[in-house]
Image: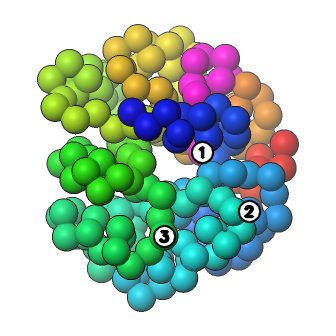
């Protein structure tokens, strides 16, 4: 795991997830240090990341949400060669080893729909050859008891994302053991 990335998360446990240019501009007026980019395409992602880096922030690109990128190693090569991105977010565990070999921070996203999500995290934690730097569980408004359960079975820190709307949601996630939260809710960015 990248100690530098974990230090960034611990220093700034609220992560801005941006889904358009207006959100990006607003996020850059906050004290947020880490930005998850959830939009763009092959033509625009280099400029989006450049804007984040110019503002002195850490930029992670959601590989599954950028138009024109496939779940293949060559897409990671593109991100490394043509952007200044610090890392990636993905739901595809097969991308993690190559991303790490390129020196990118890695966030593996899990959607918590039922007990199968717990089983997937546990299986990947026990048998995964290469672990992501962190995992992100969605929705992030899980009860603290469930977040503690994910922490128990995961070998890497947890980020809670999705549906986090206010200070109470942030505090519940952090008190449950999440290292950070990510949210598109702009009010939370300014807490």
Task: Tell how many labels.
Answer: 3
Q: Earlier in the sequence, mark 1 or mark 2?
A: 2
Tell me the SS state at disc 3.
Answer: loop
**Mark on residue 135?**
none
Mark 2 neighbour class, 10 Å CA radius: few under 14, some 14 to 19, many 20 or more: many
* CB contact under 8 Å: marks 1 and 2: no
Screen quadrant of the N terminus? top left
Q: Read off the magenta span.
A: 172-183
**Where is residue 127 shown, x and y percent of the image?**
15, 23
Using residue 163 as the reference point, say whether residue 105 is left or right of it: left
The image quadrant of residue 152 is top left
Residue at image coords 81%, 57% = 30
Tell me the SS state at disc 2.
Answer: helix
Is residue 145 located in the magenta-colored stretch of the structure? no
Q: 115 or 82, which is in the foreground? A: 82
Residue under label 2: 27
**Vertical placement of 151 versus 168: above or below?**
above
Tell me the SS state at disc 1.
Answer: strand
Residue under label 1: 182
Q: Nearer the viewer, mark 1 or mark 3?
A: 3
Residue under label 3: 84
């Amino acid at each position: 795991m990248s100690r530098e990335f974990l230090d960034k998360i611990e220093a700034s446990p609220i992560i801005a997830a941006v889904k358009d240019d207006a959100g990006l501009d607003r996020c850059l007026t906050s004290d947020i240090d880490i930005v998850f980019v959830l939009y763009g395409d092959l033509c625009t992602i280099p400029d989006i990341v450049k804007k984040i880096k110019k503002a002195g922030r850490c930029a992670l690109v959601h590989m599954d949400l950028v138009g024109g990128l496939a779940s293949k190693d060559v897409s990671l090569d593109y991100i490394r060669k043509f952007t200044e991105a610090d890392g990636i977010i993905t739901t595809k565990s097969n991308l993690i080893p190559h991303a790490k070999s390129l020196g990118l921070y890695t966030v593996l996203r899990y959607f918590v729909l039922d007990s199968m999500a717990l089983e997937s995290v546990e299986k990947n934690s026990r048998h995964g050859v290469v672990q992501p730097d962190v995992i992100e569980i969605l929705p992030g408004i899980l009860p603290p008891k469930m977040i503690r359960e994910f922490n128990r079975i995961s070998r890497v820190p947890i980020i809670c994302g999705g549906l986090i709307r206010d200070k109470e949601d942030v505090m519940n996630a952090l008190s449950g053991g999440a290292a950070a939260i990510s949210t598109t809710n702009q009010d939370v960015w300014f807490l």
